[in-house]
Amino acid sequence: MDGNAVGVFIPDRTATFQNGTTLQLEIAGWEDIPGNHTVPPNVYILDSDMLIPQLNRTRRIWVCLPEGYHDSEETYPVWYMHDGQNLFDMATSFAGEWQIDEHMLSNAGNTCKSIIVGIDNGGAHRMNEYAPWYNFQYDAGGEGATYTDFLINTLKPSVDGVFRTKPEREFTCTGGSSLGALIAMYQLLEHPEVFSRAALFSPAFWFNQEAIMNLAENAALPSDSYVYMIAGQNESASMVPLMNQMNGHLLGSGLSTSQIGLTADPSGAHSEWWGSSVFTDVYDFLAQCDASVAVTNARESQWKLYPNPARDSIALEA
């Protein structure tokens, strides 16, 4: 139920309708989500308990609409992002929000706007749903394909039916952080007929390393696909080498260096605050808001690490 800004009960409201009238409501907060809410009016809860029939679970779904959505008949690309509770609202985030709603509002003057859909993770089910293949060491994973089926065949038709979207693959992006990036990479590789772009923050390729690399090595992505991989240079020993390995597979699949953003940030960290700090750059590149700037930035961030895997000595080439 909706409440005030700190999640406290408010009485039921009534309204009288007449032909041709429009009623606009602002939800200040939710009774079942107490805390310091930081969502602006353009962020909505599409469904607090959307059924995932493929897994017999429910999930909260967020939608961030672009500035001016209600004042036009324009249609928009859609980004589907995992770990939705961390994207928009401080009160629901695990360790700080990504402030994607603020980023999109600050980008309001840009003609390159999108609808951002946030899918909450399943808590205890997160590792299972975000890993396409089972990991014996962690005794988890293997539901990624089923979770992806939910996104494609249940959630996406609902979003396309309610909002003014551009439903075609060339306007559909998937993105996430860590295991959320792993499932996003899988979705692009396995379903290029649905997704043309993937935003990968600190990708946890290590969790399903052999399988995801084999899938990428044998992929044939459409020529209009784009991928951005970004991580902190010192996040883990495997992060940079695995991103470099994936970059090689993507180049082998037919993508050019101008279609792959690849950044190892010396100050980067495995955290929400860092994801927030680089989100706009990733968005602008994948949405191709300014193609000349995006391509230049992507080329400047390209690097090669060899041999891979590293032995007693390595070379880093910018």
Image (spheres, rainbow, N blue to C red):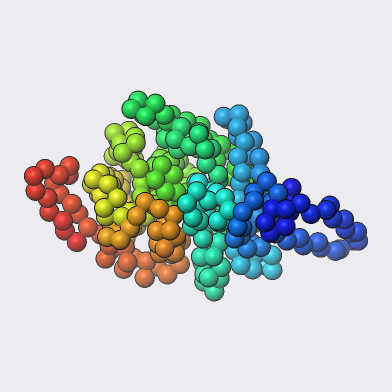
- Pick out the residue farthest to the left: 312
Residue 198 seen? no
How many numbered marks have been drawn onto this rendered protein structure?
A: 0
Q: Nearer the viewer, residue 284 or 105?
A: 105
In the picture provided, is 52 more to the left or to the right than 174?
right
User: Within the image, what quadrant is residue 279 found in?
Assistant: bottom left
Rendered residue at 45%/50% (across/down)? 175
Could you say where residue 176 lies in the image, as x and y percent from the top left?
44, 49
Rendered residue at 34%/55% (across/down)? 269
Could you say where residue 13 lies in the image, as x and y percent from the top left?
84, 55
Rendered residue at 42%/29% (across/down)? 140
In the picture provided, is 14 more to the left or to the right than 303?
right
In the picture provided, is 131 more to the left or to the right than 65?
left
Could you say where residue 34 lies in the image, as x and y percent from the top left?
64, 51
Considering the image in quadrants, where does the C terminus appear? bottom left
Residue 211 seen? yes
Residue 237 drawn above or below residue 116: above
Could you say where residue 119 lies in the image, as x and y percent from the top left?
55, 45
Rendered residue at 72%/57% (across/down)? 4
Q: Nearer the viewer, residue 318 or 204?
A: 204
In the picture provided, is 226 more to the left or to the right than 64?
left
Residue 102 drawn above or below residue 216: below
